[in-house]
Amino acid sequence: MPETTQGRIIMSHVWKMVAQRLALGLLTLFVISLIIFGAVELLPGDLAQSVLGQAATPETLAAFRRELGLDLPAHERYLSWLGGVLQGDFGNSLANRRPIADLIAVRFSNTLFLALYAAAISVPLSLVLGILAALWRNSIYDRAVNVATLSSISFPEFFVAYILIFYIAQAGIFPSIANVSPDTSLGERLYRTFLPAITLTLVVTAHMMRMTRAAIINLLASPYIEMARLKGLSPGRIILRHALPNALAPIINVIALNLAYLITGVVVVEVVFVYPGLGQLMVDSVAKRDITVVQASALIFAAAFVTLNLIADVLSTLSNPRLVHRR
Amino acid sequence: MGFLTAIAWIAAVIAVSAGLAWCFRAVAVAALPQTMAKAMRTAPLTASFGLLIILLYIFAAVFADVIAPFPERAVVGAEYLPREGLDGQFILGTDNLGRDMFSRLIYGARNTVGIAIATTALAFLIGSVLGLLAATVGGWLDQVLSRAVDVLMAIPALIFSLLLLTIFGTSITTLILVIAVIDSTRVFRLARAVAQGIVVMDYIEAAKLRGEGLWRLITREILPNAMAPLVAEFGLRFCFVFLSISALSFLGLGIQPPTADWGSMVRDNATLITFGDITPLLPAGAIALLTVAVNFVVDWMLHRASGLKE
Amino acid sequence: MTQNEKSVLLEMRGVRIEGRSDETWSEIVKGVDLTLHRGEVLGLIGESGAGKSTLGLAAMGFTRDGCRISGGSIAFDGIDLLDASEATRRDLRGKRIAYVAQSAAASFNPAHRLIDQYCEGPVQHGVMGRSEAEHDAVELYRKMRLPDPDGIGFRYPHQVSGGQLQRAMTAMAMACRPDLIIFDEPTTALDVTTQIEVLAAIRDIVDQFDTAAIYITHDLAVVAQMADRIKVLLKGEEVEEAETGRMLSAPQEAYTKSLWAVRSHARPEQPLPPVTETPVVSVRGVTAAYGKVPVLHEVTFDIHRRRTVAVVGESGSGKSTTARVITGLLPPLAGEVLFEGQALPADYRQRNKDQLRQAQMIYQMADTALNPKHRIREIIGRPVEFYLGLRGKALTERIRELLRLIELEPDNFIDRLPSELSGGQKQRIGIARALAAEPRFIICDEVTSALDQLVAEGILKLLDRLQAEFDLAYMFITHDLATVRAIADEVVVMKDGKVVEKGAKGEMFTPPHHPYTELLLSSVPEMDPDWLTDLLAERAAGRAGGRMTPAGH
């Protein structure tokens, strides 16, 4: 009886904390939308001017302004833009006048696919490598891994990508152009996007592995680990049962940080491998100064980034007994 | 077989670098004044290798005019001439417009690295001044700055810079300003965290109770104790900024032609790779090598700092 | 006692342990012998750096990272711990030799409930099954007199108080009914009144199961209650060893005698100052809070010229907060602080240079009180330059004078960094910095509690001398009643943010007392080995208040 009431109090308390985090995340997104919208307002001249250029006649300018709604005051335009975004309507591309939502939908799912593909390889890999490095710290393995990861963190993505193309794609093992369409089968997709996924894996694994190692080594110095050793427990049990539960919060955060990086950091990799993702669309649009598309892509990337950090935040809260079981 | 040759090459490169690093360390220990020599003697090979590389880059950047056989922007031959083409006149061949690759690589050290250093310095100036202020003054100033930084950091850095560069255009000045402002948020976080650890110390309380002003508090009492982590962070931030600028240039949105820059050189000559020519990898490798070198040195510094604490 | 007839449990011969710093190995323990019989309790006593914890851990065949056993032999019940395989040692640890750490709060894993951590040892060592272990845990929690023994195991460490955690950890150490327990300063982090409960519980359970123990501490009075024999260590070497009674009454070595002697230092009584004299500092009805949490209620007391007022209380009693109100770091909600009859602005930022100069502060942790990047010259010189405007030669001369005042050789010390000083020297520099401002009033916040007894003694004597020389008024914050005896003229006892009793030192140490003062006074361990037994008997009989505690000796 008292157990269950206590349990209920605990859960309601945790949900309140989760709700607070969610509210904070939504607020952040709202402010970000303001920044993204407001930044365009800083454009020298205005949108119509910068698209049509100096040569445009006043009449065409005025007509274009009306079409874009530029004759309305800024706050009204913001509200109608935000209202549209919330219903999945991002307006039209300035370059080809097509609805942005149609352009983005497929590409965003492609980007997510690539990011998840890379994450599926890199997260388990880096956790295992990191825990091993912590267990065998100061060994030859640890030092070699340290040098290797430091180096791979330092490589620009396009360097890694071109090396892979040079050695692997040239040998004809995997394609150097990751050409996929919505009706490509899953197996074919995995095959064609193998090189970009490996490139991303190489870039993020090093970072995740180093942070996992640091988090665990940090914990191994704590008195309760010494206590566990003095209780005569086996090294495996000490790592898995005593260190790992306490290292969860930092590890979750590292993973989230890198997943967020994967989603946004794919831009360069997408360009190298000519992969039809959101990043490539954004780069193309920047070159074409297709500002409405850039705005929409930036907002989607930011939303994905904020959501991931939010999930990590909630998960690491739930992994902390001090927060879940209050006095 | 290709794989095995690659492994052999890597092994050879590592062996040669280790040898060079060892010689460099021996020379440095002999040449430097006593206190610095003492630090050098305990430096691992990775760190002395890093120092050697950094010195080489600085040398190339400073004496680019002397070293480079051709001017930075001059078209000196046909397009895509092979390496050692025309009787060894062009050591690395020519690029997509017929400019000398080797000379542009040398000038790239000046341009790319120079811009990255300027950007990092600016980011540090903004970030650490605000971070130290926020931690020292506290209260509403800290709240306002920290919340603002939280929001800015919630936008992915590369995406944010793409957005801002679209709006403000891609001149070198805007590039430096945009990247510096975005990066200063990360410096702010670190500077504030470090300073917060120092501000709670009794010697800061003693200085406050003595009646010391804010300026002296920050410069004389806090800054000397925050220097070690900040200097290490400068190295890491430099790597990050350097890689971001290179990535932007590679995407065609950073340093603009005809300025010689490693990121755009990779982009301009990328097609050669599909013909089995590794020349376009050289500027990319130049970026990677410098970042590796800086990271090695920073790693050593961090290790030293944590070792001294114990 | 019949230890001699009992069989030997632990035998250490010529044990040497090295620690690594700066890539070189140096000896921490330099050839110590130790013999422990079954059921016997050995007290290991020494100051910091004596190597007592390192030696205690070595009894389990364990060294911390960066240490190694370089010589000697350690035999536990006939098993050579240094020769044995790691698996053998692991099997002994927790099962036949258990460990109780100094900070229970840090030594319990925050991610698991107490009972899970209790059961882990017996289950992993195959001593008993999980349900049996749980049953046993409740039984031992009861024996350790923990409140709610049935439920407390299902809490997480952060939900349990420090004193209770320490008892739960002792219970956990008992889980496999080991032959030997190493207690490593188990009560050092606790308040005196909590310490009593833990000491009593530990002693009972060790008696009850006839467990042998090594009890490590720096506190003589505590070890007197717990140990059958006492071994004194100094810098990794044994000074002497004897049965407790003899060690207390007739120590042989000069070092041991000097340790004992510290306890008897006391400042002579002085008459109360005349009522007409204006106090240097006067705290009037101060009420203060951190945010919405009230911490001080109506605190009132005076501090006169050339006098030392000791503010005594346990952690959380509000004594340091009172200092923060006086210095202006925490403006009070009500009340005021007068300096020589004049009200001081509540916030230090509103005080002028002279007001700031007149009240100085000396901190508990000299490590954090001195800027590690400043040389002594700057640390002491800055207040001189800032308040008194001295420059150049005059400044250097004043710094040298101040160094001589705190008994440090100027040429040797003036250009050192704090990291190049010992703990006691750092604290002296802290004193010199306060003195440099030429104040009327100094707040000493637990200035000796981080120091070894002999060093602390020197600091107290120095403070005494400086007070007479410069007419200073001291507010001396401490939790240690021995220090109060040594230095105070007047005492203010605080509890839960209120002043419960105040008056001249003589009055405070003679009955009748306020009940809390009585509890505090009676909880301070004394050198008498029967003190704890007597006290517990008395408290059980409900005759609290009948005990005489002499002021000084």
Image: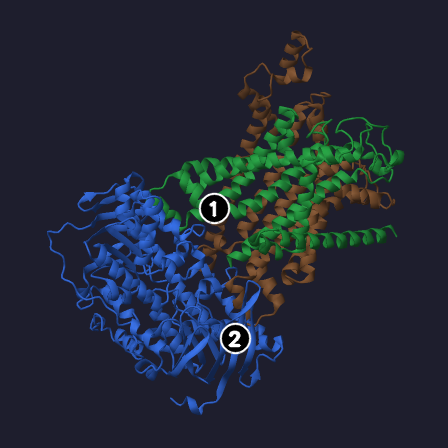
Chain colours: A brown, B green, C blue
Q: Which mark is residue C58?
A: 2
Q: In which quarter of the image is the N terminus of chain C?
A: bottom left
Task: Count every numbered label the image shows and give the total.
Answer: 2
Q: Which residue lies furthest to the front in this view?
A: C393
SS label for mark 2: helix
Res. C6 image quadrant: bottom left
SS label for mark 1: helix
- Regarding residue B76, the answer to whether it shows in the image is yes
Res. C306 image quadrant: bottom left
Q: Is residue C415 left or right of residue C87?
A: left
Name the residue: 38% across, 50% down.
Answer: C379
Query: Which amino acid type is marked by label 1?
Result: Pro
Q: Quadrant of the C terminus of chain C?
A: bottom left
Identify the residue under disc 1.
B224
On the image, the x and y values in percent for residue C492 come to 23, 58
- Mark 2 nearby-residue class (10 Å; few <14, some 14–19, many ≥20): many
Query: Which amino acid type is marked by label 2?
Result: Ala
